[in-house]
Amino acid sequence: GQNIDQPTEMTATEGAIVQINCTYQTSGFNGLFWYQQHAGEAPTFLSYNVLDGLEEKGRFSSFLSRSKGYSYLLLKELQMKDSASYLCAVRPIGQNFVFGPGTRLSVLP
Amino acid sequence: EAQVTQNPRYLITVTGKKLTVTCSQNMNHEYMSWYRQDPGLGLRQIYYSMNVEVTDKGDVPEGYKVSRKEKRNFPLILESPSPNQTSLYFCASIPGPADTGELFFGEGSRLTVL
């Protein structure tokens, strides 16, 4: 089966850096995704990792270690608009997406 | 514009009154899926479809039905809604089941069953 863990809530200050961790156990692996979701809205795609290492995209970076079943999303130069939930999702081989419970990030002034 | 469209966006109904939430995508995607999202539980898959006339149960299919008569449409049917089906529902699609790209989500449908 699949299991994904993320912290439930995090708080950070505007302008700071925050790291949101995700651990997973899955049979087979076809990629790890991060989505951002503002309250009441649809998730929007942030990043995709299939190989180990760091993927950087502007203020957001995502890291993956397949051997450890671990990923993190790094948000730099935090802005108030970054207050949202961040969803970690894995795509086991030949199967559907499995989502973690999400981490609610609050950015304070 | 490439999009996934759901209707209705908001609905309040009563127990037992059949309802359908429509989902349509204009990207010619083969794979479509329905999720429900509840506080603390994240997104849970209800049903998915690999292609026309091919549907399968996800993790929480009880109380729901789907159909896939055409590629672009994947309606979610609640034959006899109950209060525990009060939730935020999302339809999503990707080009094909083997595609490694991200899910495209609809805007969501917030359903309240009284």
Image (cartoon, coloured by chain):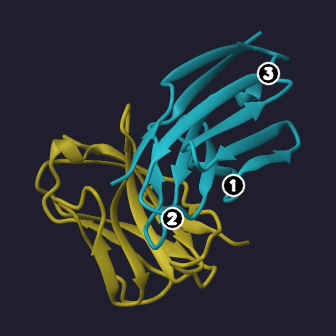
Disc 3, SS: loop
Residue underneath mark 1: A49
Alpha-carbon span between mark 2 and mark 3: 31 Å
Alpha-carbon span between mark 1 and mark 2: 20 Å
Dot 1 amino acid type: Asn
How many discs mark residues in the rendered view? Answer: 3
Residue B12, percent from left and from top: 30, 46
The residue lying at 62 percent from left, 41 percent from top is A71
| Image quarter in which the N terminus of chain A is found | bottom left
**For the residues carrying marks 1 and 2, which lies nearer the camera in this image?**
1
Please determine if labels 3 and 1 lie on a single subunit.
yes
The residue lying at 13 percent from left, 59 percent from top is B80
Residue B18, percent from left and from top: 18, 63
Quadrant of the image occupied by residue A83: top right
For chain B, the rendered hue is yellow
**For the residues carrying marks 3 and 1, which lies nearer the camera in this image?**
1
Q: In front here: A100 or A80?
A: A100
Subunit ID for the residue under disc 1: A
Residue B10, percent from left and from top: 41, 49
Dot 1: few (<14), some (14–19), or many (≥20) neighbours within 10 Å? many
For chain A, the rendered hue is cyan
Residue underneath mark 2: B92
In the rendered image, the vertical position of residue B20 relative to residue B52, given as above or below: above
Q: In front here: B39 or B106?
A: B39
Subunit ID for the residue under disc 3: A
The answer to whether the residues at label 3 and label 1 have Cβ atoms under 8 Å apart is no
Residue underneath mark 3: A17
The residue lying at 53 percent from left, 70 percent from top is B93
| Image quarter in which the C terminus of chain A is found | top right
Alpha-carbon span between mark 3 and mark 1: 20 Å
